[in-house]
Structures are given as structure tokens and as C-alpha cells.
Amino acid sequence: MMFYYIGYSSNEKIRYNASSGGIGTTIIKYLLESGRYGSSMTFVFNERECMYEPKLIYNFSEYNNCGSIYQEIDNVQFIKEHLKDIRNGIVVTCMPCQVNVIRNILNKNNIKNFIISLCCSGQTTIQGTWFYYKLLDVKKTDVKLIQYRGKGWPSGIQITMKNGDVITKDNYTYPWTLMHKSLLYRPKRCLYCTFKTNPNSDVSLADPWLKEYIENDKIGNSVIICNSEGQNVLRNMIKTGWVILKEVEEDVYVKSQVGTIEIKAQSNRYKSFNKIVEKMGADGSMYKKIVTSSVFLLKLHLKLLKKLHKIV
């Protein structure tokens, strides 16, 4: 049985700096500081490589509250490589498609685990972010830090340059939308994915894309789906003042994510289309090299995708 909530962290700083309500960050803080778990994951920006990387932590003071990361990260491989470093179980944050594999690996090695998954409409390769810099006429070697979300809701991308300048763009606006809708920087598995959430995670988190929140919320709330283990944790957090939550019906989640749910539901229907897109976006693809050489050609590519989607 699944349970549904909507709400936010009672820690104002965590809530503001997170993507949508700070619930995931607060769960990690609670489970580490209560001693129920001894390890967790965070993500830090590698300035030299110009990308985010996972890091194992044992204390919440090591945690980097960086908001959502729109960059593919191989959390499965990271867990495999750090099994011996995990102390007293681990709290994992990952994509829905990674939940089952990570859970199986940890259970097989008798490592207790609590998994937080993030509702997902499809991830982007790191090359997608680098191409985004190109559209902004920014050199990735000049980038000190990028934060995709956080600092209010729904916020947007914030790029800190090495010279101190900061470039800000509202959430899901041009030119990110141009890159993202092209599907040329979508990992192969995302093209065929039917996961929006994963019921095998203890807690799943989503943005509340509902009229009342879009019009009135400027700080952040989370839509939460949880199993019985997740609910037990959340109930304790409510009682002890860590979070402010109200229980809601399933249709609140469905309404808040209706667009992505519909797209995921149609994934199998458009396999032929996705196979074409996969070839277009393949590494070394001449087509990809040509259409990403100018904004004009990339916009023509988007028109082609619309036609293909109708006829394939």
C-alpha cells in the first residue's frame, strides 16, 4: 500500500535551497543524525571536469544541498564501488530506474538501506549541459559551478563563472528547452523508460505542478509517495517537528504529474520513433553534428521530430 503527502521541511534554509520543499534533504539529515543510518550520498560539482559526481558521506555536515541535478549520474556503479565503505546502512537518492538494481545489490550484501527516488521525466547526458553552455555562448572551462534548481521554487538554472559573474535562467526556459526537446542528449534508456516513480523506493518525491502551488508557492513544497517504511519515518519526523506535511489522496499526485505520466504511458507505443531518435543522438552521429551546429538547424530538427512523431 502506498501513502501520499504534500509539504515541506521545517528548516527554512534547507527548504529554500532545495528544489521543491527540501523533504529529501531533511530525511537524510534526520536518518543520519538520529543514528538510524550511518552513511548517505551527496553530489558535488567537480570544477575541473565541469560535472557533478556522487560522494559518500557519514555526517550531514558533509551534505551538499544543491537541488535537482539534470545530468546523468551512474549511481549503480558508485554503490558497487563503495560497498565496503558503507557504515551502518545507507540512505540513497537516485532515479526510479536505478531503485531495483541498487536495492538488490545492497540487500545481497546485507546492507540495510533506505531509498529516496526522484520522479523523473527523463534525464540528460552531461553533454547536454555542455551544449547548453554553447547556446549561451559560455565556455565550460570558465564555469565554476552550475545549480540546476534551488533557491526558491520553481527557481531555475544558476551558473557561477570563475570571474564571479552569475548567469540565471528561469526553470525550463530557452535555450535549455531547445536542447532538451531535441532529444539528442537523452540517455538511450530514457527514450524507452516507463518509470515515473518506483513503488520499491521507500519515498518518491515530485514537484507540485498544481495551480494553487504554481500561483502561490515561491519557496517550495514536495509531493510525496511512500511505502510503509517511508511512512513510518515521515510520521516520526512530523511528530518531532522535522517536516510540515498533510496526507492527501493519490489523485493529487496524478494531477501534479499528469503530463509526464501520459508521456511515460505512451513510451511503448512510440518505439519506432524512439529508435530513430536514438540513431540521431548517437555519439559520433553526423546528423547530430550538423543539426547542433546552429540554432536555426536545431529548430528545423524540432519540426522534423514533430512530423516523425505523427507518422511513425
Image (spheres, rainbow, N blue to C red):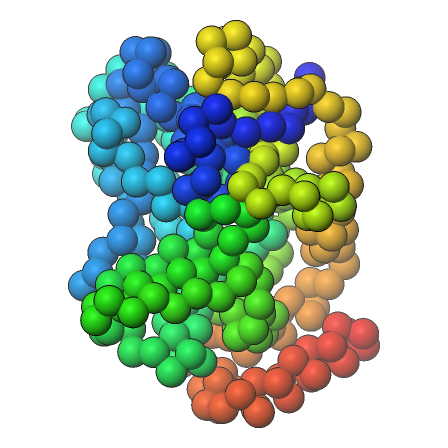
Task: Using the rendered image of the protein, determine whether residue 296 is visible from the camera's viewpoint.
Answer: yes
Q: Quadrant of residue 127?
A: bottom left
What is the quadrant of the N terminus in the image? Answer: top right
Q: Is there any visible trace of residue 104 in the rendered image?
A: no
* 134 left or right, relative to 264: left
Which percent across, then down, holds residue 80? 29, 36
Q: Is 229 situated left or right of 223 in this image?
A: left
Q: Position of residue 45 (x, y in %)?
A: 27, 53
- Residue 152, horizontal then vertical, whole percent: 50, 46
Q: Tell me the quadrant of the picture where the C terminus can be found.
A: bottom right
- Where is residue 203 drawn, in percent x and y? 54, 27
User: Is 85 placed left or right of 281 in the picture?
Assistant: left
Residue at position x 79%, y 32% in the image: 251
Foreground pick, 76 / 12: 12
Question: How many numbered tags mark residues here?
Answer: 0
Q: Residue at x 63, y 33 (%)?
A: 223
Is 284 left or right of 266, judged from the image as shown?
left
What residue is at 70 percent from the left and 83 percent from the top?
303
Q: Nearer the viewer, residue 271 or 305?
A: 305
